[in-house]
Amino acid sequence: MKFYYAPMESITIYLYRNIYEQLFGEIDKYYTPFIMPNGKRTFKTREFQDVLPEHNEGLHIVPQILTKSSEDFIRTAKELKELGYDEVNLNLGCPSRTVVAKQKGSGFLREPEVLDDFLTEIFEALDMKISIKTRIGLRDTEEFEEILSIYNRHPVYELTIHPRLQQEFYKGKPHIDVFEYAVNHSENPLCYNGDIVTKEDYDNITTRFPDVDAVMIGRGLLRNPALVREIKYGQKLTKRELLKMHDTLYEAYQGYLSGDKNVLYKMKEFWNNAAVMFTNHEKYAKKIRKVQTLKNYEQAVNTLFNDQELIK
């Protein structure tokens, strides 16, 4: 089984990826948060910094591109190829309303004929691997049959399916029956993505779909950074390991970001996910969310680690 770390906007940046790899590893591919080019420029500064080879040494990185312009996609992919990348990923999964309103991300699925033409143009123009991360439609699961038929007309290197509709965001349960339809009808290799947050979740998917050889995990790894190791070897996360990851990220963000407020924002984002790994975490997480200074933040985190244990 291949394990991919899902792109999480503003979270899984190169700084985070390097720390994660150093402390846990076991990831076959890291997908970058999306690059959103436009006609005036290819990369924002932070996007370019995120894909620089010197910031990703020793990691298998796949840059993700979010656009509805084939010209912008082709130009960006060629620039990434010059940096040494042999695969790029097209984002057709982002459910954000602001993205969808611009017909990008999962919003592109609203125009299947336009999407088909877009794919024809990029596959004809580029001599590199093009993978896709997709939702199954916007409002109705029945949309997916046509969407998959479009993907089947193109040599998609790998098709990662998050079996939710755009309007569902991350709520409710994934439509596993729709993913099963893809398993039975896709002409391209598949990767499963969606709600793998425990070893049991992973076991359920791989038992039902034994021929699928890749899974992409996002929020599950933000909660439990040792999840892939636990799946592969049965070794669970320890409190010492989580503390080490916290401390390493905290120190790195203080050197990377300007101002205590920005550091606090990043670390509160960390605890939005990781706090659930502790017993009786609610009041501690609430206190962390409310702190306004680094000193009070450090006290709140120390109290959590001292008072509570990781869930079994």
Image: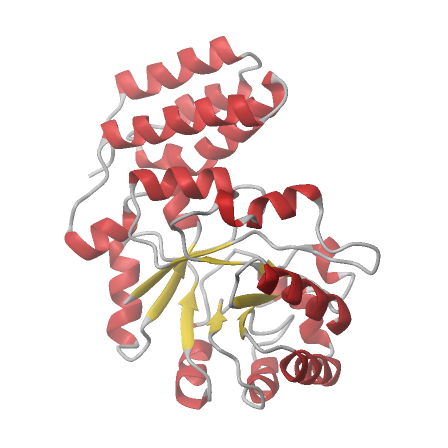
Q: In the visual, does 305 lie left or right of 142?
A: left
The residue most toward the top is: 295
**Quarter of the image where the C terminus is located:** top left
Choose between 35 and 137: the one closer to the eye: 35
Give the residue at x 48% y 77%: 157
Choose between 242 and 285: the one closer to the eye: 242
The residue most toward the left is: 234
Residue 284 percent location from the top left of the image: 40, 22
Give the residue at x 56% y 66%: 88
Give the residue at x 61% y 81%: 143
Residue 104 percent location from the top left of the image: 71, 64
Location of residue 141 by image quarter: bottom right
Give the residue at x 40% y 69%: 192
Residue 4 percent location from the top left of the image: 39, 59
The residue most toward the right is: 40
**Quarter of the image where the N terminus is located:** bottom left
Residue 137 percent location from the top left of the image: 61, 73
Q: Can residue 205 be seen in this view?
A: yes
